[in-house]
Structure formats: structure tokens, C-alpha cells
Amino acid sequence: MEDSIRKADILIEAIPYIQKFRGKVIVAKYGGSAIDNPAAMRGILQDLVFLTEVGIRSFLFMAEVLKLIGVFRTQAARRIS
């Protein structure tokens, strides 16, 4: 119950920003130590999906693209085996 209240409070606080940025494009840079952190990767992707659902368009700029490709391949290999 407390978790639901906390999430509701966050969404209520976000409403003015959602209204202000609806229809706009935001750019998110993904890189650094976050590339080596699957939880961070999952979190930012979930956030970008949420933004899309509320009408905010996003562009994910991936720093260190080759390193990120290696992370994706490693994770894919783990799922296959």
C-alpha cells in the first residue's frame, strides 16, 4: 500500500511536466558506467516507454555504441544458453 501511495505521489508531482513536454522531443544520453549495469539499462528503457505513453517523444543517444553492442551480445548469449 505504501509503495502504491509513493508511486501515486510521484505521478501527481510529474503531471505539470508531462503536460509541459507533451509533443516535445527529449534526448537521453546513455553511456558511462550505466552501460555495464543491466538494471540501469532496463530502468532507462522503462522510463522512455513511459514517456512515449504520455506523449513525450524521446531519442536515446548511445555513447560508446560498440561497448553497448557487446553488452547486448553477452546478454543474448546468456539467454540462449
Image: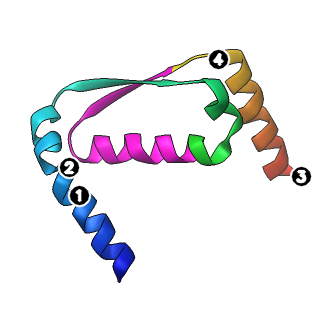
Residue kind at label 1, given as amino acid type: Leu
Q: What is the distance, in whole Å, between disc 1 and disc 3 at their CAs?
A: 39 Å
First reached walking from the N terminus: tag 2 or tag 3 = 2
Q: Residues within 10 Å of mark 2 (few under 14, many from 20)?
A: few
Looking at the image, tell me whether mark 1 or mark 3 is earlier in sequence order: 1
**Farthest residue, direction right:** 81
Q: Residue at x 48, y 42 (%)?
A: 45
Q: Which residue is mark 1?
A: 11
The amino acid at mark 3 is Ser
| Disc 2 versus disc 3: nearer the observer | 2
At 23% from the left and 35% from the top, the residue drawn is 56
Nearer to us of marks 4 and 3 is 4
Q: Secondary structure at mark 3?
A: loop
Circles 2 and 1, Cβ within 8 Å, touching? The answer is: yes
Question: Which comes before the other along the chain, label 4 or label 3?
Answer: 4
Q: Is residue 30 magenta?
A: no
Depth check, mark 1 against mark 4: the one in front is: 1
**Residue named by callout 3:** 81
Spatial separation of the CA atoms under disc 2 and disc 3: 41 Å
Callout 2 amino acid: Ala
Question: Which of label 1 and label 3 is nearer to you?
Answer: 1
Query: Where in the figure is residue 38, as x and y percent of width and height?
Result: 66, 44
How crowded pointer 4 is (Cα within 10 Å; few <14, some 14-19, many 20+) is rated as: few
The region drawn magenta spans 42-61
Residue 65 circle label: 4
Q: In terms of secondary structure, where does tag 4 sit?
A: helix
Which badge, 1 or 4, is on the more N-terminal residue? 1
- Quarter holding residue 17: top left
Q: Residue 14 bears which disc, if any?
A: 2
Q: Name the spot of residue 35 as percent of width and height, x first.
A: 65, 31
Q: Position of residue 66 (x, y in %)?
A: 71, 16
